[in-house]
Amino acid sequence: MHEVLGSERDINLTKASRYLRQYLHQVLSWFSCSSHASSAEKAWEKLSQAAVHGAVYDSRERLPHPKCLKDTRTTLLKHIYGFLDNPEKSQLVWLHGTAGVGKSAVAFTVAERMRGLKASEVTKVEKRLAGTFFFSRTNTNRCTTGYLFATLAYQLASNFSCVRSDVSKAIIEKPAVLESNSSVREQMEVLFLRPLRKLCQRQQGCPPLSFVIDALDECTSKAELVELITLLGQALREPDLPKLHILLTSRLEAHVRRAMEDEEVHQLVCEIPVKTSGDGVPDIISLDGADVDNDIYVFFNHSFASLRDHHRDFPQPTRDQLVKLATRAGRRFIVASTMMKFIDDGHNDPRGRLQIMLDLTSQLLPGTEVYRLYDRILSTCADPNRAYMHLSVVATLADPLPASQISKLLGPGEGNDVETTLVQLRSIMDIPTDSSLPVNIYHSSVRDYVSNPSNCSLPNLQPIAPHSILAYSSLRLMIEEIPASTALLDGLVELKRHSEVIPSEDPQNLRESLKFIVQPLEPLQVLSDLLWVRGDHAPVLRCWLETRDGRAWLQTEDGFDWLQTEVEADHDLDGNGENWLWPNGDGIDWLQTQSGRDWLQTHAARAWLRTLDGEDWLQTENVRDWLQTQSGRDWLQTQAARDWLQTRGGEDWLQTESGKDWLQTPHAEAWPFMGVWVTIVEFWSTLEAVSQYPIVPDFPCLPALQVIQHLKSLPDFLTFPVFLALRHPNNSTLVSSQDHLPDMEIIRAMKTFVNCANDVRERSQSASHALKYACHNWAIHLARVPRPWDARLYHVFDFFWNHNLLCWLEMHWCSKGLRACLAILYEGEKLAGDINDFVIARGRYFTHILSFQFPDERRKCSTSKCIK
């Protein structure tokens, strides 16, 4: 080896340095970590976490599932199945009707049938039901399109294992696609269309696949929904997808109708009710048609037969009574279903309750039958007004909660007797026997009922604003239960103070430096290594290079550049070649060991060591064309190729179409730096959100906003470990050589910050469901409170904003992430700006209120501090 090196001394110094760099690259590749958790498995786990499992048609969250009884809706179901079996072209089957006519029951029944049909004749596992999503306005993850395609992709890949790896690799390539605020178009392309294209060839000649998306009108954003329908129409026009049909259900709302009538979408839509002719299909198939009366009669007959199984002395209603009940239902299955739940509630005499239902007037306007039924049910409660208030709160919750947690959220007063009151409403809401499970309204018509006090005809009704109640309760609970703390702010200030002498790194250079980090990511280890890399001395070179991060860093572009600089500096200064890379250095010593000698005998080592032009060739533009050939693809499977992928040229290639295609192959999965790359992409996405977050000038002194300001002003190399500390629940330890590392003040400050983050995370995880709900949804309810706000709500918001916002930020950051906090803070700033003048004008009144609402806090702070 000495002879080999010596024979090259007469070549150009640049050539020598390049050779040595490549030589070391091969040597150190032997050290690279051999055991890494599968990046594909991690991506699959992230998809599982992003998917909304409660939106799946048979989710336990949606129990009891609405379902068409046997021998009901036969004509309608037969018509839908005819559309779903059409092998000629892909279609959007749109089922629409008024509230309570049974659209969700039809959707569940169709999904259940498709789930029982095989996707092909040669499979026993894969089913024709490719995915489902049941929207719900009362659930924050099911009232938006942001989670739709992640949920469909998870089900599709679970059903077709052959596309699971493709889905995982797509997520590895673009991890931000799982964020709910990502582009829906990109989500559809990455999570929906790509895996379906993989199935196109495989599904030729097979029955069409089916997706079921229920209750489109439950999506709270009309713009989101219109975009979704447009994108689905565009998707089904693609020629390289397998034949598939998407069943959509909704109320007949104007924005849905306009989206369905769009020129690109309309020709794909099979509408129900729809006029048809021929083939024995009725002229009109309608959810509101006269044939529904007979189906509802069948439903009542079946339900009373079931009731007699546990009430032997209950007389079967006469045919006239059943017909009368069916007439009272007004062709609305939700009315019929609620009637039966009221009659057979398990706690009252069904005979008396049957008579109450028979006494309902039949002179009702179409569509209002269910409202009068709800009136009648409320009138049987011990306190109808209180029952109406609690029903309104349950129907308005952004996410369902158990009854005990609703009581805790509402607090003294409104929260009294919640469980006792709700149990009287069991016919219109699901009250689980397990008290830890959330209560849910049975149907969206309940939410319609309480959304406007005029819908309720109860005498002496006291109108309420449920969003006002929930906003006030959320703020009050956070003020009382989140411990006052400034630990994160203090930690950031300390980090900033110790790092002022260290210049902020250029983001692109930092991106290169961060590549040496390998999972699992530990904030203190990351910080230690970054600080060492930026030092001018290397007293612990041999020790650090034996660590996982040291070996990995030396394979990056920055690591090679640093080593090359050291070589050239030593060569120019003393010419003696005494360097770790040169003879008598540590690198050559290693080559004298058995491990080094064994490595030199490998084919890859001998082949690469014989060439001096490999690096030159890899830097040419022709390499990209060559990589698309079979020989190029074969070369990408070698260790040398993986080494090259750590260079700047390799990273540039990964951004090309051919590079992206390669990332979806099994060979890319084994690339040890894949997990690191994903993490850095996520970090840069968060950093971008922070940089774009607008801080309102009127509130620069708020501690919570100071946290964001300090985070923005930290050097980039400190921002990354801060990101890791709040993203991963690690208990990091310093490297063994910590006493020799530079900037130990920063190390100690970072250690304090990590401990603080772990403490806050522990508090976040142990918080009650009610407190977690309040932290996540206070801004949602505030934004929907009718104006003008009442004085009590103005005060509690002002107090929370000025004194508890930092505590909220610390807790919510650790549970939901910084990007979620920024979105809520942005809404809060707008609200704070709107009410600022009002709060100042009412300062004296708030001081008076403060003495009653928060006497302890009034003693702690003066009026000048508590009131703006």
Image: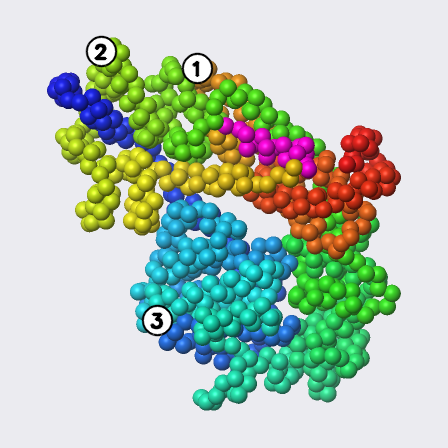
Amino acid identity at mark 2 = Asn
Question: Which quarter of the rendered picture does the C terminus lie within?
Answer: top right
**Closer-to-camera residue (493/100):** 493
Give whichever of discs 3 and 1 has the lower sequence position. 3
68 on left or right of 300:
left
47 on left or right of 454:
left
Which residue has dot 1 on it? 740
Which residue has dot 2 on it? 576
In 3D space, how far apart are the residues under numbered discs 3 and 2 (Cα atoms)?
73 Å
The quarter of the picture where residue 11 lies is top left
Residue 704 in the magenta stretch? The answer is yes
The quarter of the picture where residue 359 lies is bottom right
In 3D space, how far apart are the residues under numbered discs 3 and 1 (Cα atoms)?
67 Å
Q: Is residue 685 above or below residue 23?
A: below
Q: Residue at x 30, y 34 (%)?
A: 647
Which residue has dot 3 on it? 206
Report if residue 348 is visible in the image: no
Amino acid identity at mark 3 = Cys
What are the residue bounds of the magenta stretch? 698-715
